[in-house]
Image (cartoon, rainbow, N blue to C red):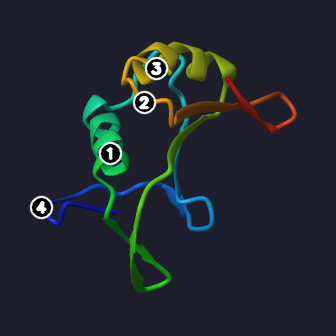
Amino acid sequence: LDLAAAQRRLSDDYWVRENAIWDFKCGYEKGHIDREQLNDYWKMMDEGGVRAVRGGAMLDTNIESVNYLFDSRAGALNNRELIEDSGSERIFVWYLDDNHQRRLL
């Protein structure tokens, strides 16, 4: 995703129908996500008009939500406060349960 054409921020995945960024996190039980990444994602939602490359095509699009998916509940819990403190109600924390099902924290 291209934030205001001045800087680049790559996400792990972008779901076109939902206008949603998905970022996958592994091994964050004791570590924290990158605050600059979180701030950039928040700006993308707030400012809109980001550019996404999908299948070789450039799409001008708005971001409706940002979703962090952790490989464990412990990793999600360890980062929840930082993400919730971002001030956006459109940034969500998910984790994979023991059956590898996605769960909203």
Rounded to the nearest whole Å, what is the CA distance between mark 4 and mark 3? 27 Å
Rounded to the nearest whole Å, what is the CA distance between mark 2 and mark 4? 23 Å
Between marks 2 and 3 in the image, the one whose residue lies nearer the viewer: 2
Q: Which residue is mark 4?
A: 6
Element under disc 3 = helix
Q: Which residue is mark 3?
A: 84
Between marks 1 and 4 in the image, the one whose residue lies nearer the viewer: 1
Rounded to the nearest whole Å, what is the CA distance between mark 1 and mark 4? 16 Å
Residue 55: x percent and y percent?
50, 83
Query: In which quadrant will I find the C terminus?
Result: top right
Kindly identify the amino acid type of the residue bearing the numbered disc 4: Ala
Q: Which residue is mark 2?
A: 88
Horizontal arrangement in the rendering, residue 87 relative to residue 24 (left or right):
left
Q: Are marks 4 and 3 in contact (CB under 8 Å)?
A: no
Q: Which residue is mark 1?
A: 46
Rounded to the nearest whole Å, what is the CA distance between mark 1 and mark 2? 9 Å
Rounded to the nearest whole Å, what is the CA distance between mark 3 and mark 1? 16 Å
Q: Are marks 1 and 2 in contact (CB under 8 Å)?
A: yes
Kindly identify the amino acid type of the residue bearing the numbered disc 1: Asp
